[in-house]
């Protein structure tokens, strides 16, 4: 009786041990709240535990909205004609809005742009199902949201700078009218003083490489497709915003069936 009980215990131990080994080997879904670190490639980006729970909830909420917009963009890229263009316009506007919200939430959590982009990439790995638009991949075909986030950030900064310039022009115009005696001259807001002109910064070598490949012909710009090229990389290089890839696609529907497919050797127009 004792010997039989011993064998039962030994077999139970083996069974439990075998289960533990299987459980260790099998992949387990990892969610952001369980992950100690978010990674960019091999470089640790930030400790999730350092983000306040309320801020983490906000990041996840905006990330979910951005994921939904990406799914709509993927659907639009497989459609042709006005239907595809209309859906793409809506999805692009929504993606831009939610990525901006993500960037702002990341800033409140003291995350830089790369870290917030890495958070979104991690969320895509864990929660996105289906086809992903090429705008979230790099030239090597790896999931990388840095280009997308940088483009959205730069585009918003450009819009803000343009709005400031419009305001300054308005104030200067009021000043000119006051000098001519039409209206009292308003007090000049010193906090919106125009920045001194700066030299044009040199382009990143990777971006400059695309500009070096441009072909000028009859006032139009073209580029010959090389391996690894995507419309997103073209839009990022020439417009500073990967989300403007539809601008290039719309100018090349005669040689492209979908925005996802570029044929090496084809010549693609790059609208100004």
Image: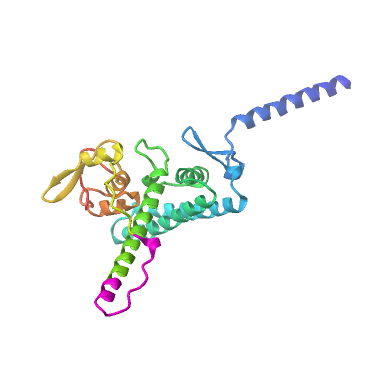
Q: Would residue 74 be seen by someone viewing this image from the given angle?
A: no
Q: In which quarter of the image is residue 19?
A: top right
What is the x, y in percent for residue 92? 38, 56
What is the x, y in percent for residue 48? 58, 43
* Above-or-below relation of 75 to 17: below
* Above-or-below relation of 41 to 232: above
Seen at 37% across and 55% down, the residue is 157
Q: Quadrant of residue 30?
A: top right
Q: Quadrant of residue 267?
A: top left
The foreground one among 158 and 66 is: 158
Judge from the rendering whether residue 172 lies leftward or rightward of residue 39; answer left or right: left
What's drawn in magenta, residue-wise? 174-193
Seen at 83% across and 21% down, the residue is 6
What is the x, y in percent for residue 187? 37, 70
Count of numbered circles on the image: 0
Based on the picture, tell me whether residue 180 belongs to the magenta stretch: yes
Judge from the rendering whether residue 28 lies leftward or rightward of residue 197; answer left or right: right
Where does the N terminus fall, quadrant-wise? Answer: top right
The foreground one among 258 and 217 is: 217
Based on the picture, tell me whether residue 212 belongs to the magenta stretch: no
Judge from the rendering whether residue 168 lies leftward or rightward of residue 252; answer left or right: right
Seen at 27% across and 54% down, the residue is 247
What is the x, y in percent for residue 238? 27, 47
Q: Residue furthest top?
A: 3
> According to the image, what is the colour scheme of the structure?
rainbow
The foreground one among 45 and 131 is: 45
């Amino acid at each position: 009786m004792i010997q039989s009980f011993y064998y039962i215990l030994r077999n139970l131990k083996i069974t439990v041990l075998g289960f533990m080994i299987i459980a260790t080997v099998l992949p387990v879904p990892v969610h952001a709240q369980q992950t100690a670190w978010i990674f960019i490639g091999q470089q640790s980006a930030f400790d999730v535990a350092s983000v306040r729970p309320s801020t983490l909830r906000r990041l996840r909420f905006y990330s979910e909205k951005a994921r939904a917009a990406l799914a709509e963009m993927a659907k639009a890229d497989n459609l042709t004609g006005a239907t595809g263009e209309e859906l793409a316009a809506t999805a692009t506007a929504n993606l831009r809005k939610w990525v901006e919200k993500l960037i702002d939430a990341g800033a409140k959590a003291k995350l830089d742009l790369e870290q917030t982009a890495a958070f979104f990439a991690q969320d895509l790995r864990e929660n996105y199902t289906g086809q992903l638009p090429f705008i979230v991949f790099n030239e090597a075909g790896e999931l990388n949201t840095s280009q997308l986030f940088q483009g959205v950030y730069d585009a918003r900064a450009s819009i803000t700078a343009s709005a400031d310039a419009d305001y300054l022009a308005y104030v200067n115009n009021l000043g000119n009218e006051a000098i001519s005696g039409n209206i009292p001259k308003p007090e000049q807001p010193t906090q919106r003083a125009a920045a001194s002109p700066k030299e044009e910064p040199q382009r990143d070598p990777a971006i400059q490489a695309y500009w070096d490949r441009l072909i000028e012909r009859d006032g139009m710009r073209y580029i010959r497709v090389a391996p690894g090229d995507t419309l997103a990389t073209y839009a990022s290089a020439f417009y500073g915003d990967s989300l403007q890839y539809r601008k290039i696609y719309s100018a090349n529907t005669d040689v492209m069936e979908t925005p996802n497919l570029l044929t090496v050797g084809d010549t693609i127009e790059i609208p100004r």
